[in-house]
Amino acid sequence: MLDTDWVYFKIAPKKMTFVTRIMEAYEYIGVVTALDGKAGIGFVRTTKDTQPLAKEVLQSLPFPVDLLTYEEAAAYAV
């Protein structure tokens, strides 16, 4: 089950481990989970408080990161 408080993203599939490690280094922002690893679709399990920071971190990475809406991510979960 997905949650509207989480941050959904799409990246190059080979970058998923990198994103996971970066978010783990922040510890308190959230936990990364692959929704469709082969497509590079993942999410960070955030709270309303940590959601803005998670988005900021993802958008500051040195490669393209597309933030997805809840509805866009839900389409991959089917």
Image (cartoon, rainbow, N blue to C red):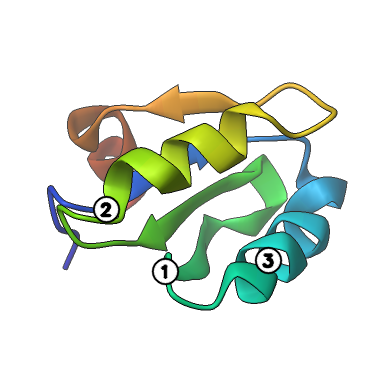
Q: Report which quarter residue 75 is drawn in.
A: top left
- Whole-percent x and y of residue 31? 47, 73
Which residue carries the number 2 mark? 6
Q: Residues within 10 Å of mark 2 (few under 14, many from 20)?
A: many
In the rendered image, which residue does mark 1 sit on? Answer: 30
Q: Mark 1 and mark 2 in contact (Cβ < 8 Å)? A: yes
Q: Position of residue 72 (x, y in %)?
A: 29, 28
| Residue type marked 1 | Gly
Judge from the rendering whether residue 30 lies leftward or rightward of residue 15; answer left or right.
left
38 over 70 or under it: above or below: below
Q: Which residue is nearer to you in this view: 69 or 74?
A: 69
Q: Secondary structure at mark 3?
A: helix
- Percent across and percent down for residue 19 are 71, 55
Judging depth in this view, the residue of 38 and 42 nearest the camera is: 42
At x 19%, y 60%, the residue is 2
**Is 21 displayed left or right of 5 in the figure?**
right
Residue 38 image label:
none
Residue 76, picture quadrant: top left
Residue appearing at x 43%, y 65% in the figure: 29
Decide which of tag 2 and tag 1 comes sooner along the chain.
2
| Rendered view: 9 above or below 14 | above
Q: Residue at x 82, y 26 (%)?
A: 63
> Quick one: 8 or 48, which is closer to the camera?
48
